[in-house]
Image (cartoon, rainbow, N blue to C red):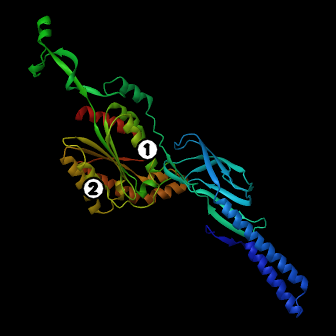
Amino acid sequence: MSYGEVKYTTRSIALAFTISFLIAISLLYSPVVPDILYLVVAVVLGYALSMRLLVELGSRTAYRLKVSRHIEGSWIEGREVSIKTRIENPTMLPIVYAEISDNYPRLFHKKKGINTTSTPIPAKGFIELNYTIVPRLGLHVFDGLEVLVKDPLGLFAYKLIVPNSRQVVRVYPAPIPLPRRIIGRWVTTSLGLSKSRIRGIGQEFMMLREYVSGDDYRFIDWKAFARHNKPFVKVFEREASLYLVLVLDAAPYMFYGLLGKTPLETIVRVIAGLLKNLAYKGDWISLIVRTYPTPRIIGLGRGRRQYHRIMRELASIKWVQKEPPISLPHILRESIAKLPKRTKALFLVFTSIGKYTNGSELQELIDAVSKARALNHDVVIVSPLPELYELETISGIEASLYTILISTSIQRAQKAATTLCRRGIKVIQVGPSSLLPRLISFIETYRSVAG
């Protein structure tokens, strides 16, 4: 049923057909129509016109309804949120009968309660809808309060969305927690979960150690030499900060699989867990999301403020089943050009290389990565296999048949990974299992070596 127009319902059509049938029968058996039939027709038409007028007045009142939503809970994926929608009629005219529906985002799951009702709305009164939903990651929209105004017999109907009842919400990712054994190991090292510092040429004194052959004589501590009659050298410390660029490909194939376990949602949780462990260490972090219609970019920054900026951007990802017009290699080249000069950055590119079905697309990606490496940057491609995410949703003989069907896609992804590895490009292929410990281990190892 379309919005913004009074429509005849099936009941009114049936009533009109019945009256026409009675008139036709009367004319068939008697050349003169009984007066009582005229009276019945007049009463029915008068009632129908009054009901149409009632619906017209009700629709005008519905446009003036005031809608407010009281929300209990945090907009974090997977956590229940209680919604209390209050619909208030500020006018002196009641709505005799209305079907009301609070249209929450289609990807959300209603846990309990009601978001629809059929009820009159009294003048200067209100009604409430109470329900609980489970949100999904990203940017979503409450489509508004839908009201279907009807007369008591349901002859006419008017459908509308109450103005100013739409609401945009951002649902934040739930970071994947780091295992306790890994936290305990890193806290006891210099590359722990606090600000990272390692030995090197810096401004802050760290310790003295005995001189060994090959040490720079400029760092000999002559006062210690005079006291102990043997040479000691000064060891300084410096910050082991990284320049980390996270590139997320939010193309349609990243939304495959069971809702809540898609590659995109899993990767975003990994990125959130990664940020939680790195943002407070003084690392410079940037985020680029390839999405439709234009990529979203958060420039380099560090600290708590940068962490919240990136988390907000991750919560703004749209579930759009359209291929972004700008290719991933083009985004890589543009992001490299915007980095500060003499900066060595580590690019973590989250994309499924199985989608590069022809040689030209794969070669374009290789060229973009080669350009980054020529400018002293490092690139690691983290490639989820979307087919494995869908495999989690089925079992038994269906899983066996599906495994046979996806074997070609997996082989294509492995072939692309082999091609990239032969060109010296590191590829990490992952399925639905946790990726966070592997990434943090890689980054901390990279920090100690690249520092």
Q: Which numbered disc covers residue 8?
A: none
Quadrant showing the N terminus? bottom right
Work out whether mark 2 precedes mark 1 in sequence or the reverse, and give the earlier one. Answer: 1
Q: Residues within 10 Å of mark 2 (few under 14, many from 20)?
A: many
Choose top left, top right, bottom left or bottom right for residue 102.
bottom right
Task: Determine the secondary structure under disc 2.
Answer: helix
Residue 264 percent location from the top left of the image: 43, 50
Residue 308 lies left or right of residue 229; in this view the side is right
| Number of callouts | 2
Residue in front for this viewpoint, 124 or 242? 124
Residue 212 lies left or right of residue 96; in this view the side is left
Residue 450 lies left or right of residue 413; in this view the side is left
Quadrant showing the C terminus? top left
Residue in front for this viewpoint, 404 or 204? 204
- Marks 2/1: CA distance? 28 Å
Task: Determine the secondary structure under disc 1.
Answer: helix
Residue 371 percent location from the top left of the image: 21, 51
From this viewpoint, is residue 267 visible?
no
Choose top left, top right, bottom left or bottom right for residue 93.
bottom right
Q: Which numbered disc covers residue 365?
A: 2
Residue 195 percent location from the top left of the image: 33, 28
Callout in the foreground (2, 1)? 1
Which amino acid lies under the numbered mark 1 shown in the image of this protein? Arg
Residue in front for this viewpoint, 65 or 276? 65
- Image vertical order of residue 29 relative to residue 174, above or below: below
**Residue at x-position 40% and y-position 30%:** 182
Q: Which residue is mark 1?
A: 312
Which amino acid lies under the numbered mark 2 shown in the image of this protein? Leu
Residue 266 percent location from the top left of the image: 45, 46
**Residue at x-position 41% and y-position 35%:** 276
From this viewpoint, is residue 334 visible?
yes
